[in-house]
Image (tube, rainbow, N blue to C red):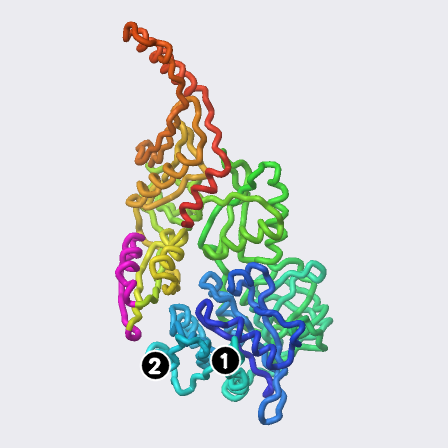
Amino acid sequence: MPHIRNFSIIAHIDHGKSTLADRLIQWTGMVGERQFRDQLLDTMDIERERGITIKSNTITLPYTADNGEEYELNLIDTPGHVDFSYEVSRALASCEGVLLLVDASQGVEAQTVANLYLAMEHDLTIIPVINKIDLPQADVEGVKGQIERELGLEADQALLCSAKEGLGVDEVLEAIVQRIPPPKGSLEQPLSALIFDAQYDSFRGAIISCRIFDGEVKPGDTIRFMYNQSTHKVEEVGIFGLQREPKKKLSAGMVGYIIAGIKTVSDTRIGDTVTLEERPTAQPLPGFKEVKPVVFASIYPVSADDYQALAEALEKYKLNDAALIYQKDASAALGQGFRCGFLGLLHLEIVTERLEREFGQSIITTVPGVQYRFTLADGQTITVDNPMHYPDPTRIKGSQEPYIRAAILVPERYLGAVLKLCLERRGVNSHISYPNPGRVEVTFEIPLAEVIIDFYDRLKTITQGYGSFDYELLDYRDSDLVKLDILVNGEKLDALSMIVHRTRARDWGVRVCDRLKDEIPRQMFKIAIQGAIGGQVISRSTISAFRKDVTAKCYGGDITRKRKLLEKQKAGKKKMKMVGQVMIPQGAFVAVLKTENE
């Protein structure tokens, strides 16, 4: 145990976390020049394209220190986005220390502070590392000042490095060995191991990544998960190199994997405790909680014939991603589909993109929404995440929606634009602080529904990419919520219904009606597109009819002849409108959603 170090790298998005991990792997000789590629620990195409970590990975690095001793460094990689903050907290619970990475040109940002607090909660040793010192705009002294003021860490303890150029990597490795304490634990105690990740292998089933706190586990043992009390026989244990490396046993202080014929990732729970069936530990490890989805949307196949293929694709996808939940859903306009729950908007984007790429599905996603609570006249409280289940308005006594606390860090010159955006989104209880000259931190309490659709994109646009955003869920608060229906030729389009705040309903209605007007083809009769709350129409667009000039042959003559022809045409149009069906093209649904994402 004295020669084991368990650590993680935490940082704001795009501060060079994956690049530093690559350098550490190269410096310890785990990979040769020929096998090396950038973002070595990121295994998905989407991760490489977007430059973000979605699925955390672990690797054990062999390192010979300056004093000649050999050490085993377990790097537990963490996802970098707020949607996956629970996974980050479980990974940190498996470590004794962290490298807190700060960009020398950008300085301390919103998630840097949030991640620091997470690390402090777990009482970890924090080593500040200033990265990207090779950039021409790097301000090392300024960033050191921020680390002292904002993070309360000693700036003279900060390491300087450039992960891209490989400068200062030796000092980082030496600091991990010298400053981070070795793991504590007892081999005599019953087995207690924390699951911080799980992935699916089509031949071996779910492979769990865990940190052993006490005891040991070896092939042939029967293990028990303390949350769902399921038991499994261990087939193989080992550590993570670039490939899995089987070992005879895993003992206290080690980080590794267990294969035990677990059928799906859903059978495991991130944060659960693993113990032995014949000699269980008395208490599970603290901090476990069920991950609950916060954003909901329906997914439909573009062609109704592809419903079965989509069902199979979702089933296979769920083997890898236990956080996704889904159930059957149906819509009059789009047919059969599924109502899905996601951890956040990034999670929704990743799921839909992977379904399209990896499973070849053509899908339509409805407007994302959140869970609302309604108190009915009889005192009953119901939770609604689908506009189709909106209760009868006459029975509603009160309604509530979830709020978040949003922390936004921006350069001072963008303060006015950011305040305007937050107030537009019904932000309240604002707090402005100046962590260092030229930078402002704005804190707002905003309804989650206002943030999930295009808030982050708008923030990046108005701050020219400099704004950083972090949030935490607060509570449910009273709100005046209504259901906005979209009607085409008097027919409701249930796939475009949404629950919105009364003050925002007209804006949404106008936006959707205008978009549909551009997408629905003209007919031989007028088509009215309306946004309505109950029986009250609040917005309207009209698609004019194709018209033949029936009076063209009437040159000269009495006006009554022209009027008679026009009246006859009007009656024909009216009859046509009564029997005419408006076919909504699939592109119209996609176009309406695109407005939300712009």
Q: In this orientation, which residue lies closer to the viewer: 130 or 300?
A: 130
Q: In the drawing, does residue 319 fall left or right of residue 516?
A: right
Q: SS of the residue at dot 1?
A: strand
Q: x, y percentage for residue 508?
A: 35, 42
The residue lying furthest to the top in this view is: 557
CA gap, disc 1 to disc 2? 22 Å
Q: Earlier in the sequence, mark 1 or mark 2?
A: 1
Q: Is residue 28 visible?
A: yes
Q: In this orientation, which residue lies closer to the viewer: 111 or 591?
A: 591
Q: In the drawing, does residue 509 fall left or right of residue 169?
A: left
Q: x, y percentage for residue 337?
A: 54, 41
Magenta stretch: residue 422 in it?
Answer: yes
Looking at the rendering, which quadrant does residue 3 occupy? bottom right
The residue lying furthest to the bottom in this view is: 67
Q: In the drawing, does residue 44 fall left or right of residue 572?
A: right
Looking at the rendering, which quadrant does residue 62 occupy? bottom right
- The residues colored magenta run 412-437
Q: Residue at x 33, y 36 (%)?
A: 533
Q: In this orientation, which residue lies closer to the viewer: 269 or 177?
A: 177
Mark 1 vs mark 2: give the one in front. 2
Task: Give the amino acid type for the residue marked by disc 1 in the picture.
Answer: Gly
Q: Are marks 1 and 2 in contact (CB under 8 Å)?
A: no
Q: x, y percentage for residue 112?
A: 41, 72
Looking at the rendering, which quadrant does residue 123 occupy? bottom left
Q: Is residue 253 visible?
A: no
Q: Name the residue tied to disc 1.
A: 97
Residue 167 position (above or below residue 597): below
Q: SS of the residue at dot 2?
A: helix
Q: x, y percentage for residue 165?
A: 52, 78
Task: Give the amino acid type for the residue marked by disc 2 in the picture.
Answer: Gly
Q: Name the residue tied to disc 2.
A: 145
